Every structure is written in structure tokens, then in C-alpha cells.
Image (cartoon, rainbow, N blue to C red):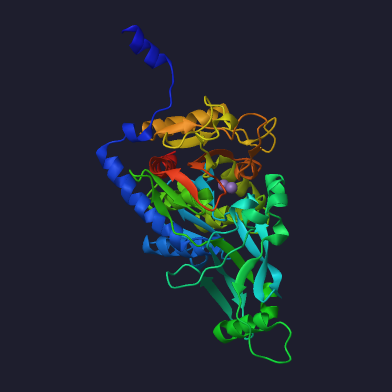
Amino acid sequence: MTDKELYDSLTYEKKNAYTEMTDAERAEMTELCDQYRGFLDRCKTERECVKEAIKMAEAAGFKKLTELDVLKPGDKVYKINRNKNIFLAVIGTEDIHKGINIAGAHIDSPRLDLKQNPLYEKNDMALLKTHYYGGIKKYQWPTIPLAIHGVIFNDKGEKKDIVIGERDDDPVFVITDLLPHLAKDQMAKKMTEGIEAENMNLLIGGIPIEAEDVKEKVKFAILKLLNARYGITERSFQSAEFEIVPAHKARNVGLDESFIGAYGHDDRVCAYTTLRGILSETAPKRTAAAILVDKEEIGSMGNTGARSAFMTMTFAEITEKLTGRCSITDLNRVIENSACMSSDVSAAVDPNYSEVSEARNASFAGKGVSIEKYTGARGKYDSSDASAEYVYEIGRLMDDDGVIWQTGELGKVDQGGGGTIAQYVANLNMDVIDCGVPVLSMHAPFEVVAKTDVYMAYRAYKAFYKR
Ligand code: MN
Ligand code: MN
């Protein structure tokens, strides 16, 4: 062995995934990414992701868990939680008490929500008040075309799904911003204060109605239009859920089309690849499962978030339908022997801002799926910090299956940080590790990922089910 060969065998260097891939893998990657772009365009909210997941699951032979009394190995089932959270499983041949392999991604993304009394008129313009959801840089959201997605109950008590701004012939909506000529004071502000949350009001109309005795003629016109179209009134908004999202479609980025730019890669890139992974399972040894959760961007709270009991309740339901019983001890055994891939994105090193990352430990776009032992902030606060045993086991699984992966962390120590659902899964007494796609411009209206990493995430989740 030459010194060079010995050096190469003793040292570790991250590799460009594309260079390492076979032609067949590259072709599969392109096909997967074309389909992923379509998914992104159809699924801009958690509700839309769940709907699409049901459609895909049913096409793959999955049945509603609630409609089956008894389960057997090979059965494919799904369960919906409040239209925003879905659990899918393929029942394994092995005793369920030996645990479940579950991959978990989130399907909510940073956005603007409408407030409960959103509509008002000013200067002959009708506007909607918004409340941002998740960690956004507020200055990124004005002056881009926006679409409205949501549900509202009309006067007859019927639930209406409304989407405006996605079809080519739809109008879009926008939050206006100051012209530079008059922005002297604004431009002197800190970036966090340059755009104020209460100024993020959506322009939705400007033609007044001809009505002598009505004061707000534009607002009146908009309400008349909404009532004629959807049977709703101003009060209907009080119970509605409307999400304001970028109206643009997912696009290939780069002359070589090596990247995908889109709204909501965090975390739909992992949700989609997780979904594709579980849907391709047929007869696993250990029961394979996937969960797509809501509310990760606001701390995994609520009954549809990762901190909800929905996942463990579904474990119990599966155990009982498989074995005829599920005592507390049965459920505890299932949980403690289960293992989780927290399928969530990581920060890719941005060549424009490489100073916030520590290059030896950061993840790079195009160098494979990123596996993160810990996330968190400062002294690893709010992190689950996976054990050496589990990190080794996952790494081996990836290597054995030819998955190109890299380690990652969320920025330089003390630069900032963040959390995922991993910590809440870990609290249940389950092994868990973060594994996902490195993203550029995370939480921006147009985030960027490398296609190779999307493909390797899909391969990673499939490899995980061989555990
Ligand atoms: Mn995320
Ligand atoms: Mn996020």
C-alpha cells in the first residue's frame, strides 16, 4: 500500500454525491425529483399534504386502520389525525414487541396565517391582517406573489376548501413595501424591525361598490363577492384557517438543473421521500411506519404536532389489532424497542455566508443526506443527542445500502441553532436521530435543495426500514 492509499483509507472526506452515483441512480434521481416538484405544487399546506398522502397510500394498497379489526403481517394501513397529521405502517413479520421502525417528517412550513377578523379597508383598498407562523425573515415576504389556501365554514355549516392564486388564470395577492425613495427611516432600521408584523397586510381588492349609505365600499364589494362565490360572511373568518403561501411553482435551478427551488422544502422534501419510502415497503421484518406531523415550526405543540399522543396511541391500536391485547407494559415494550428517523432538513453551507458554519462538521448541498447526532442550541440545549450505539447502527445501515451520507450540525457552536421533532420522540424512550436534506435559504419563500440529496434521503429512509 502506498502512503497515499494508506492516507485515503485512514482519513474521511465528504464526497460529492453525484460523482459517486451510477447512471441508473442518476436516472432514478431525476424521475423522483420531477415527481417531487409536482408534489410541492399540489401540497403547500399540511392539509393538502395529508390529502395527497392518502391518495398515494390508497393507490399503493394502504387501508384505513380504523376500518380493520384484525391485522396480520404484510397489511398496509394508515390513520388520519384531524386532517393535518397522518400515520402509515406496513406490518412486519416479526413480533411487534420487538419494536417499530418509524420515520417522522413534518408537513407544516413557515407562512403567514390570516387573523380571525382579517378584513378591513383603508385608502380605498381592501386588506387582510396576517399573523406569521414559524420562523420567517419578515422582509422576504412583501412584494412577492402570494396565494391563499384554507378552509372556511359557510352560513350553511358546510366546510369549503379554498385555494386562490395557484392556477395560471387566478389572481394573486401581495404585501406591499415602501419604495426606496421614501424608505430613509426604514432602511436605517435593523433587519428584524424593517418590516413590522402588523404591516404585513395582504392586498385583496380595490373596486368600490356604488352604495350611497355604506362607508366601506371596497370592503363591502369584497364581502359581496365572497358571499356570492362561497356563501361566507365576515363572521365566517372567525373559525377559518387560511394560510398565505408563495404562489410560485417549484422549479429546477441551475443550467444543469442540479437543484430544485421551491416553497416548503422544509420539511416536505423529507415528508415526500419518507412517504415514498414507506409506500414502497412490502414485507418488512420489523413493522415499518411513517408519520407526517404538523406544528413542528411552532414547537411541535398541539394535538397534530409531534408532542401529541397520536403516534403512541396508534402504536397501541396496531399492537392490539395484531396480538389481541395491548397492556400498558405491552405498549411500553413496543415503544422502547422502536427506533425513529427524524426526517427533517438541515442547513446547507451557503457559499455567500460560510462564516456561520464550521466546515468540518456542517452539511453541504450535494454531498448526500445529512445525519445529525444532535441539533439544539448553545450547550446542546433542546437536543436529543443520539447515542453512539444508534449513530453507528444507522451509519452501518446506510453504508450497507450504498447511501451517500454526511454528518451535519446546525451552524457554528453559539451561532444560533434549532430543534426538530427528535427531542420529543426521544422523550418517549425511543432511539432517534435526525436525517434529512441540507437546504439553502431555509424558511425563505424559495428554498433550494440539491437533487442528489433528495434522492439520497429517499434511499436513506428505505435503508432504515431494513433495520
Ligand atoms: Mn424542519
Ligand atoms: Mn423549519
Q: Residue at x 62, y 80 (%)?
A: 222
Q: Quadrant of the N terminus?
A: top left
Q: Quadrant of the C terminus?
A: top left
Residue 71 appears in the picture as rendered: no
Rendered location of residue 43, percent (x, y) = 48, 61
Rendered location of residue 173, percent (x, y) = 56, 67
Left or right: 6 in relation to 347? left
Asked if 445 appears above or below 47 in the picture, the reply is: above
Q: Residue at x 32, y 48 (%)?
A: 30
In the image, 184 versus 5, the foreground residue is 184
In the image, 295 versus 30, the foreground residue is 30
Q: Residue at x 70, y 35 (%)?
A: 381
Residue 280 appears in the picture as rendered: yes
In the image, 53 versus 137, the foreground residue is 137
Left or right: 184 in relation to 21? right
Disc tally is 0
**Residue with the most extreme left position:** 23
Rendered location of residue 341, percent (x, y) = 52, 42
**Residue with the most extreme front position:** 181
Quarter of image, res 176: bottom right
Quarter of image, res 57: bottom left
In the image, 311 versus 8, the foreground residue is 8
Rendered location of residue 241, percent (x, y) = 63, 68
